Amino acid sequence: MVPEVTETLVAYDEANRSLTYEASGMPAFVTTARNTWTVTPLGEHRSRVTVDAQFDTRGLLGALARRLLLLQVGRTSRHLADDLRYYVEHDTPSPRKQRQVARRQRP
């Protein structure tokens, strides 16, 4: 059974173009699951997006799960920049993201 995770915006800094959100509803061995996104302008039509993730666990189960979760995050985040770029350029989710959402909605 997969827990229902909720992400809550906990900080927003318009001047520095950043936001931070935290996950709740994680298993008990997860003590912190937080991401900060920062957008840095590189010119009139270019920006860099930096994602700083903090993921902390406790206990033996946490240490084991942390390794597995980080491997999974590494695999799923490979397409993050491509999906974000597609969304910014086309104002719609990427075809890959649309397929992913459709799979989750199937019974």
Image: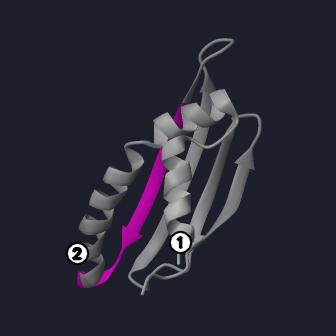
> Furthest residue to the front?
107
Spatial CA distance of label 2 from label 1 is 31 Å
Type of the residue with mark 1:
Arg
Q: Secondary structure at mark 2?
A: helix
Q: Secondary structure at mark 1?
A: loop
Q: Is residue 16 above or below residue 6?
A: above
Disc number at residue 41?
Answer: none
Mark 2 = which residue?
A: 64
Label 2, residues with CA under 10 Å away: few <14, some 14-19, many ≥20: few
- 82 in the magenta segment: no
Q: Residue 25, image x and y in percent?
A: 55, 80
Pick whichever, 100 or 75, lies toward us: 100
Q: Is residue 65 above or below residue 11?
A: below
Q: Residue 57, image x and y in percent?
A: 36, 74
Residue drawn at point x = 24 percent, y = 65 percent? 67
Question: Nearer the observer, disc 2 or disc 1?
Answer: 1
Residue drawn at point x = 60 percent, y = 18 percent? 46
- 56 in the magenta segment: yes
Type of the residue with mark 2:
Leu
Residue drawn at point x = 38 percent, y = 82 percent? 29
Disc number at residue 106?
Answer: 1
Residue drawn at point x = 32 percent, y = 66 percent? 69
- The magenta-colored residue range is 49-60
Label 1, residues with CA under 10 Å away: few <14, some 14-19, many ≥20: few
> Furthest residue to the top?
44
Q: Residue 33, image x and y in percent?
A: 49, 66
